[in-house]
Image: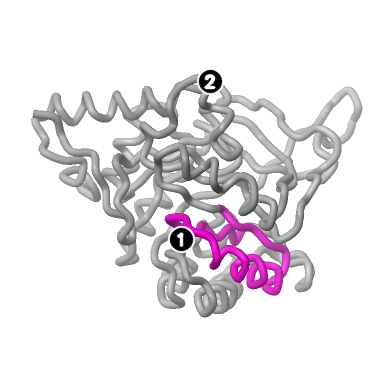
Amino acid sequence: MKASLETNFAGVVFKNPIVLASGTCGFGQELREWFNPGRLGGLCSKGLTLNARSGNGGIRVWETASGMMNSVGLENPGVRCFIERELILMKALGTAVIVNLAGHSIDDYLEAVELLNAASFDLLELNISCPNLKAGGAIFGADADRAGEVVRKVRAVCKHKLVVKLSPAANDIVGVARTCQDEGADALSLVNTFPAMAIDTEKRSAVFDNIYAGLSGPAIKPIALRMVHQVAKAVSIPVMGIGGITTAQDAIEFIMAGAHLVQVGSANFINPLISLEILEGLQTWLDSKGLASVGEIRGVV
């Protein structure tokens, strides 16, 4: 008998714990030529902002040892266009739909949330790794006070289940996690990309126009795993693990560290079928151990 992969996450039932990470699969349509995304537990949309953004100029993606860096700049069609054109296509894929929302001011978040309140989807993932431009550029997720303010105000108007995506740049990620929980978050996802840098020695300049970019991929996995373990032990709401997951073994480690779900991101650029292979590998491993469900290994470490 096969082990059950069904996972309850903040009241939303996922058919399995494998989710496609924001910014790595668009709105899901790009993967249809490779496999049926409906086989996965969920799909997280490209990061949305209130209004459309063209993103950053210059180089946007840079390969690193055991990972990649990106400075895309939240290129997206804006919340209104997403609701009108993309959301219906995402829902038709037959998997749980997670909408990722970013913003550069609290007012931006709140106006976008009001628009999204009229739409039907499973979870809202609030990206608090954006710089608060009205407060001098410090990111919302840098400390508990800033994170708490945006979560409290969004929670007051948000009609959807609210997942807060944490930044590894936080000065105390456990403290931020606890504050987000206290202010009404239904769940947490972590971690976002790590601040990083690349230099073109021939040009004697930074590779990216914005100097710094976000590092993801296998290079960050051990650190992300540690952070997920720390946060999962410190809060009572469910956690979604993110960071360098490329194999079923990686996914199993994150679940053992306390994650209910895992997001697969950068690995999609290496192999578009990787999430399906991770799912199948997870099933095979659980069955080989004679386990009845994936829940039996959650948080065992």
Question: What kind of residue is marked 1?
Answer: Val
**Viewer-side residue, 193 vs 269:** 269
Q: Estimate the x, y position of residue 200 in percent, counting from the top left.
A: 83, 28
Quadrant housing residue 131: bottom right
Q: In the figure, is residue 21 to the left or right of 68?
A: left
Using a 10 Å C-alpha cutoff, classify the residue at mark 2 as few (fewer than 14 neighbours), some (14 to 19) or many (20 or more).
few
Q: Estimate the x, y position of residue 95 in percent, counting from the top left.
A: 40, 41
Q: In the figure, is residue 191 to the left or right of 4?
A: right
Which residue is painted at 71% across and 46% down in the image?
76
Range shown magenta: 100-129
Q: Is residue 188 above or below residue 114?
A: above
Whether residue 156 is visible: yes
- In space, the residues marked 1 and 2 are separated at their CA atoms by 30 Å
Q: Estimate the x, y position of residue 287 in percent, counting from the top left.
A: 15, 27
Could you tell me which quadrant the N terminus lies in? top left
Which residue is painted at 33% across and 49% down in the image?
259
Foreground label between 1 and 2: 2
Q: Secondary structure at mark 1?
A: strand
Q: Is residue 103 magenta?
A: yes
| Disc 2 target residue | 33
Q: Is residue 282 above or below residue 293?
A: above
**Viewer-side residue, 206 vs 27:** 27
Quadrant housing residue 39: top left
Question: What kind of residue is marked 2?
Answer: Glu
Quadrant housing residue 132: bottom right
Question: Quick one: label 1 or label 2, which is nearer the N terminus?
Answer: 2
**Viewer-side residue, 201 vs 62:** 62
Q: In the figure, is residue 110 to the left or right of 284?
A: right
| Disc 1 target residue | 163
Which residue is painted at 64% across and 72% down in the image?
110
